[in-house]
Amino acid sequence: MLVATPERALDLAQGGHLRLGTLSGFVLDATDRMLETDASDAVRRIVGMLPEGRQGLLFGTTLPAAVTALSASLLRDPVLVEIAPDHGRTPCCRDRQNERAA
């Protein structure tokens, strides 16, 4: 498992210290933040070094159009998983204070 910023991973690969062609999967977290820092070029270069049959996961707290475009270019048959906001309440938990007041 490799945990690194896109720029550091690219630096290691270009220096011959990391063989990206042997990885079976990759995970990009905070994808929306990477686009704000122009790391998408490094990500595209890294993905170009990965084998064709790899699995890829992208995570982000927001889904701007740039992230959608990036995922479409990096992933094959992507699946979007969204978590709806809970508006401050967890459906599995009861509000005991309101139960006492009733």
Image: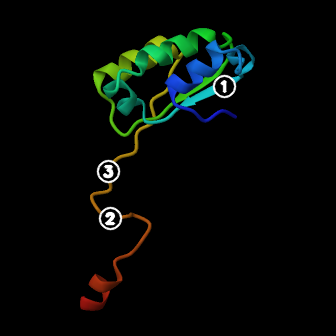
Q: Which element is circle 2 on?
A: loop
Residue at 67 percent of width and 18 percent of height: 54
| Frontmost residue, 33 versus 101 | 33
Report crowding for label 2: few under 14, some 14 to 19, many 20 or more residues within 10 A (C-alpha): few
Q: CA distance from mark 1 to mark 2?
A: 35 Å
Q: Nearer the viewer, mark 1 or mark 2?
A: 1
Mark linked to residue 85: 3
Asked if the residue at tag 3 contacts the one at tag 2, i.e. Cβ–Cβ closer than 8 Å, the answer is: no
- Which residue is tagged 2? 89
Q: Amino acid at mark 1?
A: Gly
State the image coordinates of residue 57 (x, y, percent, origin top left).
55, 29
Dot 3 or dot 1, earlier in sequence: 1
State the image coordinates of residue 78 (x, y, percent, origin top left).
50, 21
Q: Which element is circle 3 on?
A: loop
Residue at 66 percent of width and 10 percent of height: 52
Q: CA distance from mark 2 to mark 3?
A: 9 Å
Asked if the residue at tag 1 contacts the one at tag 3, i.e. Cβ–Cβ closer than 8 Å, the answer is: no
Residue 89 appears left or right of 7: left
State the image coordinates of residue 94 (x, y, percent, origin top left).
38, 75
Asked whether the viewer can see residue 82, the reply is yes
State the image coordinates of residue 71 (x, y, percent, origin top left).
45, 19
Q: Amino acid at mark 3?
A: Pro
- Which residue is tagged 1? 25
